[in-house]
Image (cartoon, helix red, strand yellow):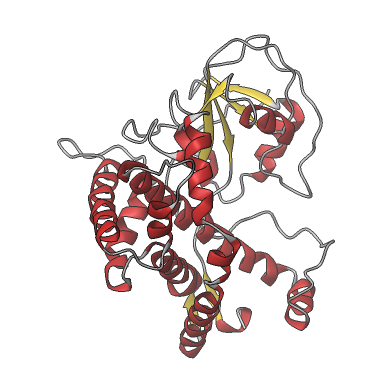
Amino acid sequence: MVEPYTLDVPRRADPYPYYAELRREEPVHYSPVEDIWVLTRFDDCMAAFSDPHVWSSQRRGNLLNDLPERIGRTLGTTDPPRHTFARRLVNKAFTPRTVAGLEPLIRGESAALHDAACAKGTFEYVHDISAPLNARILGAMFGVPESEFLRVRGWLDDFFVRDKPEPGREPRQVVAMRELRAYVDTLVEARLQDPGDDLMSAMLAAREDGESLTHEQVAVTTMTFLTAGFESTNNLFTNMVHALAEVPDIHARLRADPSAPPTATPTPSPTPIASTSTGPAAGTSASVTAPTSASARRSGGCSHGWPSRTSSPVPARWPSTWTAPYASARPTSVASSAST
């Protein structure tokens, strides 16, 4: 019998063997501890993501223990047609030309942080490179002055916390969301008065059939990109560096020709090294709005090699909540020679 899934699983140093066991033994797994169902196969989750009539992001949000203040207000917590309309307008701001214009900034910031870290000899990759690079890029994208981003970063970190607060105190994530929203509101008002060359201004200017995004939609969309972008990209950077350090031949090939990434690579150790996730927000969830007997398919975090795409039987009546977990991990120190 498979050990019941708990919200502490993503905090493990190496959760991937457990995910592999779930896919192998119970790809549609019910956890009596958390009262949720966990899908761990690719096609199962793709089926859930692709059917908003049955799987709702708007009913209870798209994070486990999602904040009520978010539900129904963000791109990730709305269903069609509201989601479709807002996404079309947001996409008008994220044109290839807009994103390509960030390349000089990204290259310049990367080089500056790299040089400063290497000058120290030994450095902490998350603290010295990944987090500040991510923060500066996001700040530039949405017009957050660098001088203010240190304060914003604290709210972004706290947003994903789901620890119990001390008696008489508000949860950190609730405080973070309120403070971040108040700050973003001031940015929206400033862009309405004086548009700039940033994505928030582009969202405010986007039009379709005479309709535009409201102040509320621009504010919550900006918050979504700041929170989700900071978390996921920070994890991407750190785990990518760890993988390259563990497979030196890939690192050497990429340095020799960065324009031609390998198409077939050895699988590094599954142990990830860094994440800002601190609690059960580390996952994606949806809620069922109607009974279904469809056979779903899917694959979640993989241990060794690619996840399987094998179909799996599912209950005749799906549960009220499911989650597609992913792993978080711990920061580490990296010698400068590993990052050159």
Viewer-nearest residue: 246 or 64: 64
Q: Position of residue 197 (x, y in %)?
A: 40, 68
In screen coordinates, is 13 left or right of 244? left
Viewer-nearest residue: 212 or 222: 212
In the rendered image, which quarter contains the C terminus?
bottom right
Viewer-nearest residue: 112 or 195: 195
On screen, residue 260 above or below 45 = below
Residue lying at the far bottom of the rendered structure:
119
Res. 7 visible in picture:
no
On screen, residue 18 above or below 121 = above
Res. 290 visible in picture:
yes
The residue lying at 37 percent from left, 49 percent from top is: 223
The residue lying at 47 percent from left, 81 percent from top is: 113
Q: Position of residue 295 (x, y in %)?
A: 75, 18
Residue lying at the far front of the rendered structure:
210
In screen coordinates, is 211 left or right of 42? left
The residue lying at 77 percent from left, 69 percent from top is: 261
In the rendered image, which quarter contains the N terminus?
top right
Viewer-nearest residue: 286 or 224: 224
Q: Position of residue 201 (x, y in %)?
A: 38, 59
How many callouts does the rendering have? 0
